[in-house]
Image (cartoon, rainbow, N blue to C red):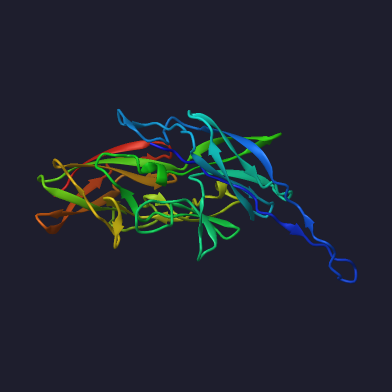
Amino acid sequence: MKKYLFIIAAACVALVACNKNETPVESLEVSTPVKMTLTATIGTDTKITYVDESNVLKAEWEQYNKVSLLAVDGSGRLLSNDIFTAQDNGKTAEFEGTYTNNQNTAFVLVYYPALTTTDPIEYGYMSPVENGYSDQGVLYAFNEMYTHIRTSYFLQKENADPSHLCQYSVMAGQAVMDGNNFTVNLEHLSYVIKMICQLPETGHMAKYLSISSYESDGEQGPESWISHSGWGSYNTDLGLPVQGVSNITNFCFGNTVDSGSGTGITLEGNTLTAYVVGYGSAEIAEGNYWNISLTTKYEETDVDLCAKHEFLSAKTLEPGNMYRLNLTLE
């Protein structure tokens, strides 16, 4: 499975000075693009090229993976987004690219996945996604000040296949510059839940999975969230959101997303294995519970299969880890 890494770099800026008569003088170009390398190391053993080996996901770079290098000024304003490409494989890999080299840069962030596309409406940078429904990936750089994590239209194309995680996993780090080389140690900002769902019989086509999280009293309050989402500013917490939260996670199955649901995976037996992604660190209190609903097509009829999972003790879901959840759906 392929892995992606994003680095966001600074955009070109011009300084304009005025004399005492407010007559503008010649603007000064403050960017001098330069070829550079980036040495990027994945910080934990949880992996980017996702292969499920004995219930452990491991990550390594593959040649031609891409990252975004973001240059940010002292006020937290994005200056440029430069894309660097991996030249080799491994847990540590060397990337090459052209750094905008804006003189107003205060620090440089590296993001995975890379922000390689542009939103024509919001005028921001986005990570790519392959779901046949939306062109808005999980990571999104909005205007000059904020990033956003989107938690909708996740798509898994095959049963028990974690290859889609390379599109939805997020890593970030602050780069250190030494001559013509950057180095960065990337932190995982996402975790994975491996959900093994037993269905009541064979013959189902899995289309759509929904997880709703509740506190012990049945309320969807601030202590029942599953995942971080929403906005974050570049000058705090690596530019990624840590305040916005979500109590619901939705997941689609099939080759594409159609009208908010997947086109479907026909199961050979009665077991569905799904790899669901969450962001940030989720602290789940004792007594909290999840309601899980799976929409399938069975004998040409849409069917909703459900399960409830109660947490008998407190649990913390940490980035960089994979958690296993066995469910019996009825």
Residue at 29%, 63% in the rendered image: 259
Q: Report x, y in % for residue 314.
A: 34, 41
Q: Report x, y in % for residue 300.
A: 11, 58
Residue at 53%, 31% in the rendered image: 93
Q: Report x, y in % for residue 78.
A: 62, 54
* Occupied quadrant, residue 143: bottom right
Residue at 52%, 29% in the rendered image: 92
Tell me if residue 293 can be seen.
no
Above or below, comparing residue 189 to residue 89 in the picture: below
The foreground one among 313 and 200 is 200
Q: Is residue 245 left or right of residue 11?
A: left
The foreground one among 95 and 10 is 95
Q: How many marks?
A: 0
The foreground one among 88 and 61 is 88
Q: Residue furthest right?
A: 20
The foreground one among 300 and 58 is 300
* Occupied quadrant, residue 262: bottom left
Tell me if residue 152 can be seen.
yes
Q: Is residue 111 left or right of residue 169?
A: right
State which quarter of the image contains the N terminus. Answer: top left
Q: Report x, y in % for residue 222.
A: 40, 55
Q: Is residue 10 left or right of residue 149?
A: right
